[in-house]
Image (cartoon, rainbow, N blue to C red):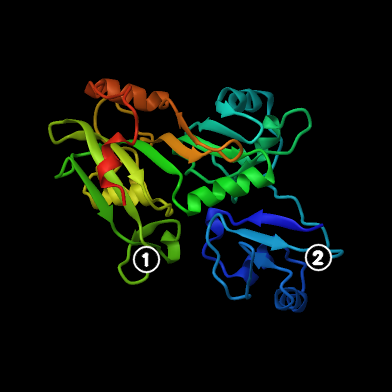
């Protein structure tokens, strides 16, 4: 049976042949090359070559591959417990027959990894309705980032949503509590990011030569002297750890982000949590079924509510996201 699969964010920018090696380790290389030569494998509907670099959200058409040894189940995958299932149902902000939007809690990984047996991807059967299709991830959030996360209920809806992310039709607004206050109350950060090598391979850094373009708009909602600020952020690109790296570049690391801010990323005060203070506040995306724009807003997690209260941040909390960036759109 022919399948159409989405390229996950952590799979970019893999070569197409290496992507197949990960997904179908038993597929002989010679057979892969033949399928490519005959145009049976396509990327976004076009012929592809083995060395083509993939981008997150692209669609790979995989023709019938014949009998291959079944893939071994990932050790990190396990069914959700009753409490986890209820937590996930309670996190739903919006759902219809095409898509689901959840408010991902902080501390929950979206996908599994080494030594990680609890993650969202393993729990998605919980959200299937009446034996329907298993919802599919459209994009990702870091484990410790909370907020709006989209799921597609069908392959077609997932593909349309992924296409909206690729074409930048999807808009995302984040809230962050940062240590210090940016020099300018509103601005744009345009700094290319590249993954670091070696022991720090799970980090990114500004790299003018090898980095991929990364653009973030920000504004200061409120601040306390030069100690802390509540930022509203809108990423125009979707690079790994983009907002965390860009906030650190401003000289104002996100509270709790020791990876990018070191010791300077922790404010003192008994009312300030040491958890990461980054929340995907809202998303605006073309609806994959009925058309028009869907906007969903997620309430922040309790540790951010507590920290905001500690600093007396309240003004603008109920305001509409994105308004600060309307005149600075690219």
Q: Which residue is mark 1?
A: 211
Residue 305, percent from left and from top: 35, 23
Residue 207 as seen in the image, left or right of residue 311 = right
Residue 264 as seen in the image, left or right of residue 31 = left
Q: Give whichever of 318, 193 is nearer the camera.
A: 318
Q: Quarter of the image holding residue 120?
A: top right
Residue 97, percent from left and from top: 66, 32
50 versus 134 height, above or below: below
Q: Nearer the viewer, mark 2 or mark 1?
A: 2
In percent of the image, x 28 and y 57: which residue is there?
190
Q: Which residue is mark 2?
A: 65
Q: Quarter of the image holding residue 322?
A: top left
In percent of the image, x 27 and y 37: which residue is there?
324
Q: Residue 188's mark?
A: none
Q: Give the SS element for disc 1.
A: loop
Residue 79 as seen in the image, left or right of residue 211 = right
Say which label, 2 or 1, has the lower sequence index: 2
Residue 116, percent from left and from top: 60, 44
Quarter the N terminus occupies = bottom right
Residue 111, percent from left and from top: 59, 45
Query: Label 2 vs label 1: CA separation?
Result: 36 Å
**Do we see residue 119 in this rendering?**
no
In percent of the image, x 69 and y 30: which residue is there?
126
Outermost residue, right direction?
67
Q: Quarter of the image holding residue 298?
A: top left
Q: Give whichever of 27, 58 is nearer the camera.
A: 58
Crowd class of label 1 (few under 14; some 14 to 19; many from 20; radius 10 Å)? some
27 versus 234 height, above or below: below
Q: Give the SS element for disc 2.
A: loop
In percent of the image, x 24 and y 22: which residue is there?
315
């Amino acid at each position: 049976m022919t399948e159409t699969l989405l390229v996950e964010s952590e799979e970019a920018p893999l070569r197409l042949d290496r992507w197949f090696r990960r997904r179908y380790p038993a597929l002989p290389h010679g057979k892969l090359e033949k399928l490519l030569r005959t145009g049976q494998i396509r990327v976004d509907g076009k012929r592809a070559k083995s060395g083509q670099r993939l981008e997150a959200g692209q669609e790979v058409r995989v023709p019938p591959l014949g009998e291959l040894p079944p893939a071994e189940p990932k050790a990190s995958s396990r069914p959700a417990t009753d409490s986890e299932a209820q937590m996930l149902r309670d996190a739903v902000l919006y759902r219809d027959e095409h898509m689901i939007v959840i408010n991902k809690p902080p501390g929950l990984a979206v996908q599994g990894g080494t030594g990680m047996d609890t993650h969202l991807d393993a729990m998605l059967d919980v959200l299937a309705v009446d034996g329907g299709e298993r919802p599919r991830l459209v994009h990702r959030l870091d484990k410790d980032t909370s907020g709006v996360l989209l799921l597609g209920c069908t392959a077609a809806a997932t593909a349309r949503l992924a296409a909206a992310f690729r074409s930048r039709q999807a808009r995302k607004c984040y809230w962050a509590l940062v240590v210090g206050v940016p020099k300018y109350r509103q601005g744009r950060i345009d700094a290319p990011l590249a993954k670091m090598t070696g022991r720090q391979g799970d980090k990114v850094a500004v790299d003018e030569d090898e980095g991929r373009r990364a653009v973030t708009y920000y504004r200061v909602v409120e601040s306390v002297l030069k100690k802390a600020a509540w930022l509203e952020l809108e990423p125009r690109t979707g690079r790994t750890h983009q907002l965390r790296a860009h906030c650190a570049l401003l000289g104002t690391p996100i509270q709790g982000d020791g990876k990018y801010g070191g010791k300077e990323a922790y404010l003192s005060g008994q009312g300030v949590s040491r958890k990461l203070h980054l929340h995907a506040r809202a998303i605006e995306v073309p609806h994959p079924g009925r058309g028009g724009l869907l906007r969903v807003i997620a309430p922040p997690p309790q540790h951010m509510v507590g920290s905001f209260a500690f600093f007396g941040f309240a003004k603008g909390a109920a305001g509409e996201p994105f308004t600060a960036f309307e005149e600075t759109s690219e």
